[in-house]
Amino acid sequence: MTTKPTTEDKAPLTGLRVLVVEDDYFIADEICTTLRNGGAEILGPSPDIEQGLHLIRSQHIDCAVLDINLRGDLAFSLARELQKRGTPSIFATGYDSSVLPGAFSNSVRLEKPVNLAALLHAVQSLCTPMKTQADPERS
Amino acid sequence: MTSAVSTGVDFTGRLSRGLQRVVAARGSEAVFAAAAKAAYDIAGADGLCALPRDFPHYWLVTPEAPAVLSLKQDSAWHRLVASTATAANDAIIQHRPGMEVELPEGRRLRTETILTVPLDPSSAYLAICFFWRDGFIPSSEQLSLLPALACTSSLALRAQQQEEDLQRSHERQRLQILELQHRARNILALVRSIIRRSSSTADSAEYFASHLEGRISALARTQGSLIIDGRAGPELEDLIRAEMTANAVRENQFVLTGPSIRLSTRGTETMALMLHELTTNALKFGALTAAGGLIAVSWSVDNSTSPSRLRWNWTETGVTIVKTTPHRRGFGQELIERVLPYELDARTKFTFAPGGVLCEVDLPLNARTTSFNEGLRETSPDMNPEISPEMRQG
């Protein structure tokens, strides 16, 4: 609490590319602003599965924040596509965890309204292990 | 022709075991298979036919194998049941009806005897018919036991059907609760964003409070009319009228013209927020500041495109002085220029014209903007959304 904030603390997500798929403009804007302030580069936001899928297939993504109900379509097809590529997903949703299919039951799920500090933390902790592996000095 | 004679065989014991197996069976196939096996044990029946009341397939079950066969419009079985229908609820025995029964795998069997047991009108089946091949006639004692077997089979199926219906209804209720929970959370998230936005553009606490109150009230008005399973928002006209009434706009200050249309839950919320901003703006700077000012809101559905499009116009007239474009993007402008395109795929235009504000919204009437197709689709295949009559036309 008393330690001096370093650049890394201020922008813990620097260098990370985060996909945001959320059909609500205001919520998407809030999530994007939070992540951008955390140093992340935002892909999207996409309001639907189609655009989200296009981004997944055409861009390098470190992590994705997905709303479950996208204009009536469920976002699990996106999560599966990301899972195939080894990209972690965070579900930001108004639904109960019982809606998550078995394959995602251990995924990070943030309830709406999303706690923005928890969102930053979730993105950071999901992406950090990969950074550590890539960085020999840390091991 | 030899008649099977009762020779101390325990038929009632066989019936009793048969009934137990019928009641224990799960699913139509298993119930009929158990019934056919029991009918064979009790009376040497070669099989049974279960004739449905209103679906196009019937069951033809032999002790070896049950089969589902497609029912021709005027099948021999139908004619048979129709010919016995006069006798109300009594089982009818027919000897030498000269009927050929089509068995699974293309085999055929010429019947010597058919026993038709009509079922009660609440059953999904009209009747269950037991049949015997040429050369075999069951005894009257054997025959007398079969109606009980048919009725028990029908009851077992009905009980299972009711159990399934109940389960489906529980599942539907669970999904509705999830949907409500989801909506409540989404609306709270939306309110939080509105608070954030209202505070970032407010010059004073009072300004902030009054704007926030207005926006939340506009949102609240959409909630009262949303049907519990979230499938329909209010009539567009009612939504506009409610906003006008809430701001004490007099009847002679606005004109509404357009067909009946309902938008999706989210579409309704976004439209309500936009209407609120436009009305507030008109009260402060536009048509509602002058005695002769008028707001004309008109909309139409263009069916020449696929999907159809809703073209919606807000036109203010009778204003002499109109404040020029504000130096910073307000909440209302953000709604019109950013939120509607993002959430509803709308094309929008917002201009401060000499006579007053003009706002045009042109949006596709698709799954996301109209009131059908909401909710959890992937997990609820049986929850087919009902298409409202308006949308069917549109």
Image (cartoon, rainbow, N blue to C red):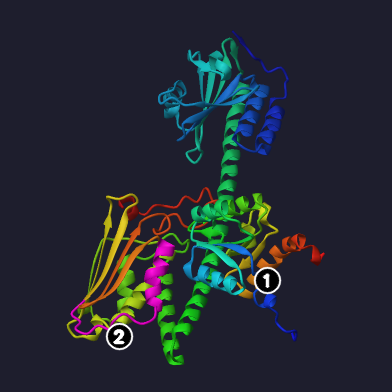
Note whether B354 is above or below B150 in the view shown: below
Residue B2 vs residue B312: left or right?
Answer: right
Instruction: Look at the image and give the residue range highlighted in magenta.
Output: B317-344
- Crowdedness near tag 1: few (<14), some (14–19) or many (≥20) residues, C-alpha within 10 Å: some
Q: Secondary structure at mark 2?
A: helix
Residue B394, given in percent of the width and then of the height, sits at 31, 52
Residue B49 vs residue B303: left or right?
Answer: right
Is residue B91 visible to us here?
no
- Residue at the limit of the structure toward the right, as seen here: A139
| Residue drawn 70% across the image and 27% down it | B14
| Residue drawn 66% across the image and 27% down it | B38
Residue A68, given in percent of the width and then of the height, sits at 56, 59
Residue A121: mark in rendering: 1
The answer to whether marks 2 and 1 sit on the same chain is no
| Residue drawn 39% across the image and 52% down it | B387
Observer-side mark, 2 or 1, equals 1
